[in-house]
Image: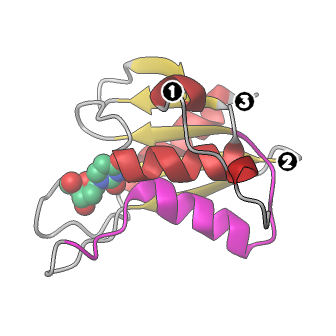
Amino acid sequence: MENEKLIKIANEMRDKAYAPFSKYTVGASVEVEGGKIIGGCNVESASYGLTACAERVALYNAISKGYTSFNAIAVASKNGGFPCGACRQVIWELCENIPVLIIDNENGITKTSSKELLPNAFSKDKLENY
Ligand code: THU
């Protein structure tokens, strides 16, 4: 896994964030099968509740490009914020257990995993129709 490139793209994605309300810019990058890296940023709404987090934007961007298998995800913010609860569920469902890298603006890196972020997750294998 090319962590350097993954981290670079997560950082670059922060510049694309649309965060006029919180001013808290977040970039995310996901390494897909074959090694390509796809990015996303947070996109806020004046309603607040419709805001889309960077992690989900990155994953949905990758899915919309046809990728279904993910190797790692990185999330960059000024102070190394961790994925919110909703993103943890989506990361788990789409990626199962993958490395999650949390990046701050001093290039501090915290390594965790989607399993560690969401212990005892509700999983799709519980659904009879899956
Ligand atoms: N945000 C993310 O993009 N990812 C997270 O996991 C946590 C929060 C964004 C949403 C909102 O635009 C801003 O950070 C402040 O909550």
Residue at the spot of label 2:
33
Q: Quadrant of the C terminus?
A: bottom right
**Is 7 placed above or below 19 here?**
above
Q: Residue at x 53, y 35 (%)?
A: 7
Q: In terms of depth relative to the viewer, which is nearer, 36 or 129? A: 129
Q: Quadrant of the N terminus?
A: top right
Residues under numbered marks 3 and 1 in contact, where contact means CB atoms less than 8 Å apart: no
Residue 2, numbered label? 3
For residue 56: magenta? yes
* Structural distance between the alpha carbons of marks 2 and 3: 13 Å
Dot placed on the residue nearer the N-terminal end, 3 or 1: 3
Q: Which residues are magenta?
A: 49-71
Residue 129 visible: yes
Residue 21: give x, y in percent of width and height. Answer: 10, 68
Residue 119, numbered label? 1
Amino acid residing under circle 1: Pro
Q: Residue at x 61, y 69 (%)?
A: 61
Q: Residues within 10 Å of mark 2 (few under 14, many from 20)?
A: few
- Tell me: 18 left or right of 110: left
For residue 26: magenta? no
